[in-house]
Amino acid sequence: MPHTSTPRRTPPRRQALHAIGALLALGLGATGAAYAQASPWPAKPVRIVVPFAAGGTTDILARAIAPELGKAFGQQFIVDNRGGAGGNIGAELVARSAPDGYTLLMGTVGTHGINRALYKQLPYDPIKDFAPVTLVASVPNVMVMNTEKARSLGINTVQDFIRYAQANPGKLNMASSGNGTSIHLAGELFKSMTGTYMLHMPYRGSAPALLDMVGGNMDVMFDNLPSSMAHIKGGKLKALAVTSAKRSTALPDVPTVEEAGGPALKGFEASSWFGLLAPAGTPADIVQRVQQEVAKALATPAVKERLLSQGAIPGGNTSAEFASLIDREHRKWAQVVKASGAKVD
């Protein structure tokens, strides 16, 4: 009979090594999926990075939805303020975070619409480095002055302001929440359209800038409406105009910049928006779940009324719709930056 050899058995240790190698090979190029499969999400608290100081509109909106997301997912959603460089520090932190669903960014028109055109170099790519989740809210900016200072200078309207600024170049200072923010750029657009000059004073967020506005150390600011609303209602700040195309329902008696400014400001519009983004590569199912729960939270009477009362219009659109908005805003603000001549090194 012919001799039949018995196949050699692979040692158990080598079998184990082969199995591990196969698993590693399958995992290459699927980092986000690997994170998702490690354990059910969320298995620990989730961080929402706010790229500005506490107390500003970006912070207010993050803190409005964080508790609702915590209830929905059974884990804490913690707001982490990382201000500086017009939002770039916080945005870069998220762009470089693991795409595992545990780090989100409350992005803005500044971080994802303006900064690419305004800065010579960004430490992140607003498109490639992020997965858009959903728009949280859009808001008009509001042109405010310290009430006492406006009274002492005889400024009651936008026209009064323009006349004074043109007659006194460099005597007024303009506060903002940082270089490259919508607050900064709204002021730069105003300056370019009216031929006025004001010294720009950037802060690490809206809240510290507002403290100096209320204290009389700053003259004018084009702030996001929600963060200025309490000071306007309290009489500390005087609202001269809103920067949106239409009047805000939260301040119906305050005209738009275009209405109040005359021919020189025809077509002026510089509204802001805020939305959640995740690092690129975050599993699609996590992105979708967060989007759905944010939309639910924004539709609840309590959250909706809270935002509307402060001049914010709730969002909640799909990830694809938010991505399209970001793309449109890139193109729009590139033109505005070019026209205004604003630049940040």
Image (cartoon, grey):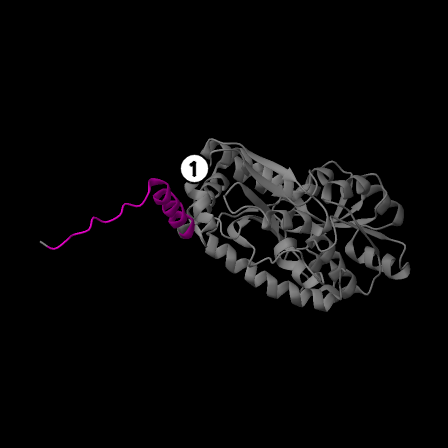
User: From the viewer's perspective, is 131 left or right of 238?
Assistant: left
Circle 1 is placed at which residue position? 39
Q: Secondary structure at mark 1?
A: loop
What's the residue at 64%, 54% (across, down)? Answer: 111
Percent x, y for residue 220? 80, 50
Percent x, y for residue 16? 37, 42
Percent x, y for residue 314? 54, 46
User: From the viewer's perspective, is 128 left or right of 344?
Assistant: left
Q: Would residue 159 be counted in the magenta stretch?
A: no
Residue 171 in sight: yes
User: From the viewer's perspective, is 156 left or right of 289?
Assistant: right
User: Picture quarter containing residue 211?
Assistant: top right
The answer to whether 339 is drawn above or below residue 296 in the figure is below
- Viewer-side residue, 202 vs 26: 26
User: From the viewer's perspective, is 166 left or right of 140?
Assistant: right
The answer to whether 115 is drawn above or below residue 81 in the figure is below
What's the residue at 61%, 37% (across, down)? Answer: 79
Residue 242 in sight: no
Residue stretch in magenta: 2-25
- Count all numbered tags in the image, as a single digit: 1
Which quadrant: the C terminus?
A: bottom right
- Viewer-side residue, 294 vs 238: 294
